[in-house]
């Protein structure tokens, strides 16, 4: 910056647009360092094993420091002992930061830029695919869980960074699961403004990739419809739920458990809108499918019975609601006896 009389903002703008000249720049008279940044990288990476170099290539697509990447992302995506050796090698070469005893690593954005600058297009595509697979394998359930949500908080920034890199890339269709899972986590945290664009992006990609009648499209429609229901946009939610139900019935038949989920989602929407006569037959259809699919002792059956009993209670049919409630309770107890061992 001193040599070229640039401000920090001007230098940063040039770095973002054309990093190569800066990476290769070296002036012995003004820089108290014996080689250029590019040459220093070359000397460090040249000593790496093949596995460590391949891991470094995947790490260049993750969020940079200060974001940490939890070791859980490596333990679920491959041979952990081998990956640990490769991580140790990168740490010894100062290409990543992995303090003693830490359960996460981090990588500096300059290391990422220089590494990407030296990769071929084939290496970029292959490593980006590997990075996506690693993070997707590590994603926990978006439903509430203390350990799972802590992991989500560590992985979210890496998901965002990868999704940004994948926009309009040939690999983007592979990322729709990540979009949906991240969006569902945001929805469960009531961060609907973050969740909705992700859901709509996943839906658009799957429709373009698979066509409008694919089962993955039904999944996307249901996810988005549930968010719309939570934000009181009932008309749009109903339209998407009906479409998801039609796609599911066409692809997997009228008696599949996923069809029961579609029936139940639509029934819950009608229930919330006080359209009880329309909700009741859908609840009963979902219950019948799950009883046939899983038997009377499955937790899903208990959920369906509970939903139907709540509707009967709201419509003042207490006598009819009571057997459903009692049956639900017996179903829960039978399911628990199968799942949870009794104390001796």
Image (spheres, rainbow, N blue to C red):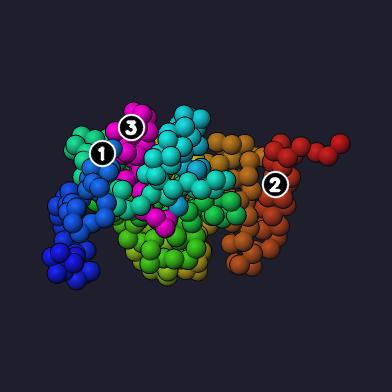
Residue 235 x %, y %? 36, 66
Q: Residue at x 60, y 67 (%)?
A: 315
- Say which of 230 and 323 sits in front: 230
Residue 202 screen position, x and y as percent:
31, 51
Q: CA distance from mark 1 to mark 2?
A: 62 Å
Query: Closer to us: mark 2 or mark 3?
Result: 3
Residue 224 image-quadrant placement: bottom left
The dot on residue 42 is 1
Picture quarter with the C terminus? top right
Q: Which mark is residue 332?
A: 2
First to last magenta residue range: 44-67
Relative to 147, residue 134 above or below = above
Question: With respect to residue 125, does 280 lie above or below?
Answer: below
Quarter of the picture holding the N terminus: bottom left
Q: Secondary structure at mark 1?
A: helix
Q: Residue 245: give x, y in percent of width and height.
A: 39, 48
Question: Which image quarter: residue 123?
Answer: top left
**Percent position (x, y) of residue 168?**
21, 49
Q: CA distance from mark 2 to mark 3?
A: 60 Å
Q: Is residue 225 left or right of residue 124?
A: right
- Numbered disc 2: secondary structure: helix
Determine if the magenta segment contains residue 50: yes
Residue 122 drawn above or below residue 22: above
Which numbered disc, 1 or 2, marks the residue closer to the eye? 1
């Amino acid at each position: 910056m001193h040599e070229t009389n640039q401000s920090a903002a001007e230098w940063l703008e040039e770095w973002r647009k054309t990093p190569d000249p800066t990476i290769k720049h070296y002036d012995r008279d003004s820089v108290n360092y014996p080689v250029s940044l590019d040459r220093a990288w070359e000397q460090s990476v040249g000593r790496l094993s093949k596995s460590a170099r391949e891991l470094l290539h995947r790490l260049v697509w993750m969020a940079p420091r200060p974001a940490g990447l939890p070791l859980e992302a490596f333990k679920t995506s491959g041979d952990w002992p081998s990956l640990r050796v490769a991580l140790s090698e990168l740490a010894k070469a100062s290409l990543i930061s992995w303090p003693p005893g830490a359960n996460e690593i981090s990588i500096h954005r300059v290391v990422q830029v220089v590494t990407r600058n030296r990769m071929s297009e084939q290496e970029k595509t292959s490593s980006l695919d590997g990075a996506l697979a690693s993070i997707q394998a590590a994603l926990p359930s978006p439903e509430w869980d203390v350990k799972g949500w802590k992991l989500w908080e560590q992985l979210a920034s890496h998901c965002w960074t990868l999704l940004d890199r994948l926009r309009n890339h040939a690999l983007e269709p592979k990322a729709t699961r990540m979009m949906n899972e991240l969006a569902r986590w945001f929805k469960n945290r009531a961060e609907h403004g973050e969740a909705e664009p992700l859901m709509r992006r996943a839906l658009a990609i799957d429709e373009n990739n698979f066509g409008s009648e694919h089962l993955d499209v039904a999944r996307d429609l249901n996810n988005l419809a549930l968010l719309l229901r939570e934000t009181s946009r009932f008309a749009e939610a109903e339209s998407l739920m009906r479409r998801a139900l039609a796609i599911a019935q066409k692809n997997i038949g009228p008696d599949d458990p996923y069809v029961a989920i579609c029936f139940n989602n639509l029934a819950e929407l009608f229930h919330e809108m006080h359209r009880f006569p329309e909700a009741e037959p859908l609840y009963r259809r979902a219950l019948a499918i799950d009883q046939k699919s899983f038997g009377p002792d499955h937790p899903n059956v208990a959920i369906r019975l509970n939903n139907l009993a709540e509707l009967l209670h709201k419509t003042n049919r207490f006598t009819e609601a009571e057997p459903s409630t009692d049956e639900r309770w017996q179903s829960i107890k039978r399911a628990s006896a199968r799942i949870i061992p009794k104390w001796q």
